[in-house]
Image (cartoon, rainbow, N blue to C red):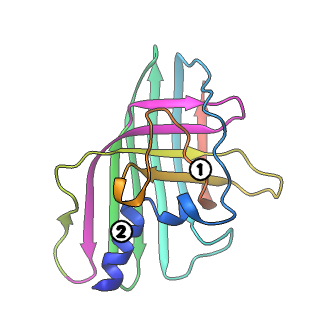
Amino acid sequence: MRKLTTAIALTTAAVALAAGTAGTAAAAPATPLPAQHLALHSWTLLNEHGPGPNPGERLTAQVSARTVDGHSRGHVVVQHVFEKSGTTRAEFDVDCLTVDGNGAITVTGPISQVVITPLVGEPYLFEEGRHPEAGLTFYPTDEQGERRVGFNRTDPQMHSEVVKCGAVPAGFWVIGGGTFLRR
């Protein structure tokens, strides 16, 4: 149970590693390009430990978002499956979709729910009634040919804050899937 609680705290707090581990990439300056029409569709398999496979865990991010005439909407699901303890699924509704001058794509929005499903037991809502801002940023391929992603949520206890339309520092590696942006 302690491992599940730790996993929940790490995942729903956007994995403290994403914000504080040495060697994580810094966020690009928050200079979103004016966007009247954007559409983002993404399904990515992520790893918080490095660019290779991640045995015993499966972390995915799924995004369907669009901006029409400057108004953003859509839905994001970040799911972390632990083979020995259960699943944490965080969902948020998109309130902003931007692309900065370097090509980093950011979606932000309030968390609608976090569902914890223990390996044995019934699913339950974590922090029911709380709707902190969450963000997901997809960075362009870096010099090493790696794709990186940042994910976080506002949590005063973890000293993390996500600002609407603000980029999130990279803390994960993309090890599968793809991200497609249409302008």
Measured Cα–Cα span from mark 1 to mark 2: 19 Å
Quarter occupied by residue 21: bottom right
Question: Dot 1: few (<14), some (14–19), or many (≥20) neighbours within 10 Å?
Answer: many
Tell me what residue is drawn at x 43 percent, y 46 percent: 161
Asked if residue 29 shows in the view, the reply is: yes
Label 1: element kind: loop
Locate the N terminus by quadrant.
bottom left
Residue 48, percent from left and from top: 57, 67
Instruction: Say whether residue 82 is left or right of residue 176.
Output: left
Q: Nearer the viewer, residue 34 or 25?
A: 25
Tell me what residue is drawn at x 46 percent, y 29 percent: 66
Residue extent of the magenta highlight: 94-120
Q: Amino acid at mark 2?
A: Ala
Q: Earlier in the sequence, mark 1 or mark 2?
A: 2
Residue 80, percent from left and from top: 42, 67
Is the magenta region chiefly helix, strand or loop? strand
Instruction: Say whether residue 146 is left or right of residue 78.
Output: right
- Residue tagged 1: 169
Q: Nearer the viewer, residue 63 or 114?
A: 114
- Residue tagged 2: 9
162 in relation to 34, above or below? below
Tell me what residue is drawn at x 47 percent, y 64 percent: 15
135 in relation to 175, above or below? above
Instruction: Say whether residue 56 is left or right of residue 139.
Output: left
Residue 56, percent from left and from top: 49, 82
Question: Dot 2: few (<14), some (14–19), or many (≥20) neighbours within 10 Å?
Answer: some
